[in-house]
């Protein structure tokens, strides 16, 4: 089971909420997360997230923190996965016809065409570094923490300050004994700043439910937009709105990644070439401070197929002439023909002579 999530937003230093994590930079620097794209997979017991950030700003380095329910492993992901998913679930265009003329059609005016619009237990120490790797531009530390203050200590040791609001937002994860993946982001070139699209990271961890961490997004200073692309055995849906607008399905359909492996090699490799049902979900968060939990996804009641379609409305024509005009002319001709035949039949009908006049005999 796979989930593709896209998080858009430009957030303000020193903490940046970005979907399934939070960004921390030095107070004298600024970094904005222009786009966060994540692919999340779940087979019932193991979850994986392939995540890519597009950032800009003047910070020479930053820390990104993501809570996870169990011990995680981290490696670089396949960047081509994101373009394949975008192509697979892209909206389509279609033409639909209407019969009666509208405001811009003849005889009212215009050309007759109109366009319209048709998502492991913690270690014994307060903070334990359970793994550390250098992956491309990333210095990745996998941590356990028993309280936000301990996590704050690790950040300070690495040159960062944990904002009070972020410490408060992390408390529910600490209470649930979640762990953290802490990634130190640094430019590949010495003396540079963080900018552009970073290499994707791939995280794997045990999970008995399909969950996408969203709680830290309540720290965002601007409205948030979330896109989820779910690949599973059935059509999927969030359990609730978690403080945002009602989630909207933009795509739903079954895809055989085995037969279409040439078109989607990265996706086929991720799914093992098995057929999957793809569900794309969009959701807006006009007031991020209302976000009250993490997204959990479940199977929808039915595997109903759907695809976002942008329609171009056209007046129905036959041989270049508006169908409504031809219909009216045809109707008028049919009425005229019926009247003509009725009159003609009436004229040909034989005239019945009047009965003979009987003259009574004269009286005597």
Image (spheres, rainbow, N blue to C red):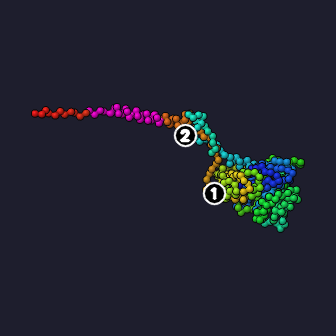
Q: Earlier in the sequence, mark 1 or mark 2?
A: 2
Q: Residue at x 76, y 53 (%)?
A: 220
Q: Is residue 97 above or below residue 37?
A: above
Q: Residue at x 81, y 62 (%)?
A: 148
Q: Position of residue 149 (x, y in %)?
A: 83, 63
Which residue lies under the disc numbered 2?
99
In which quadrant is the C terminus drawn? Answer: top left
Q: Residue at x 79, y 53 (%)?
A: 16
Q: Residue at x 64, y 47 (%)?
A: 308
- In depth, the one of 172 and 27 nearer the eye is 27
Q: Is residue 275 left or right of residue 175?
A: left
Q: Is residue 263 above or below residue 42?
A: above
Which residue lies under the disc numbered 1?
300
Whether residue 182 is visible to the viewer of this picture, yes or no, is no
Q: Is residue 115 above or below residue 156?
A: above
Q: Secondary structure at mark 2?
A: loop
Task: Specify the label residue 52 is tagged with.
Answer: none
Predominant secondary structure, magenta span: helix
Q: Position of residue 49 (x, y in %)?
A: 75, 56
To which quarter of the image does residue 153 belong?
bottom right
Q: Secondary structure at mark 1?
A: loop
Camera-near label (1 vs 2) is: 2
- Residue 122 drawn in magenta: no
Q: Which residues are magenta?
A: 330-353
């Amino acid at each position: 089971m796979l989930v593709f999530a896209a998080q858009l937003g430009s957030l303000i230093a020193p903490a940046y909420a970005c979907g399934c994590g939070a960004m921390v930079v030095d107070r004298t620097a600024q970094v904005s997360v222009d786009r966060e794209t994540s692919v999340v997979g779940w087979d019932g017991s193991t979850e994986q997230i392939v995540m890519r950030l597009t950032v800009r700003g003047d910070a020479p380095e930053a820390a990104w923190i993501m809570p996870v329910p169990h011990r995680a492993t981290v490696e670089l992901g396949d960047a081509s996965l994101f373009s394949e998913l975008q192509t697979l679930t892209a909206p389509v265009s279609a033409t639909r016809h209407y019969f009666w003329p509208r405001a811009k059609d003849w005889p009212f005016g215009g050309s007759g065409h109109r366009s319209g619009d048709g998502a492991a237990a913690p270690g014994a120490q307060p903070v334990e570094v359970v793994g550390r790797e250098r992956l491309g531009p990333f210095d990745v530390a996998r941590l356990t923490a028993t309280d936000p203050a301990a996590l704050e200590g690790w950040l300070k040791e690495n040159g960062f300050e944990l904002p009070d609001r972020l410490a408060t937002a992390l408390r529910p994860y600490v209470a649930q004994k979640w762990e953290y993946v802490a990634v130190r982001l640094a430019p590949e070139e010495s003396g540079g700043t963080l900018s552009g699209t970073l290499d994707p990271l791939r995280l794997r961890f045990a999970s008995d439910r399909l969950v996408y961490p969203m709680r830290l997004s309540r720290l965002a200073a601007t409205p948030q937009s979330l896109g989820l692309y779910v690949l599973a055995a059935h059509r999927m849906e969030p359990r609730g709105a978690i403080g945002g607008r009602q989630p909207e399905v933009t795509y739903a359909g079954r895809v055989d990644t085995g037969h279409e492996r040439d078109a989607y090699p990265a996706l086929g490799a991720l799914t093992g070439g098995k057929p999957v049902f793809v569900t794309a979900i969009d959701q807006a968060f006009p007031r991020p401070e209302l976000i009250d939990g993490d997204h959990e996804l479940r199977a929808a009641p039915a595997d109903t197929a759907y695809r976002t379609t942008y329609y171009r409305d056209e007046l129905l024509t036959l041989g270049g002439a508006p169908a409504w005009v031809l219909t009216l002319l045809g109707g008028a001709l049919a009425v005229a023909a019926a009247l003509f035949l009725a009159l003609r039949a009436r004229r040909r009908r034989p005239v019945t002579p009047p009965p003979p006049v009987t003259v009574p005999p004269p009286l005597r």
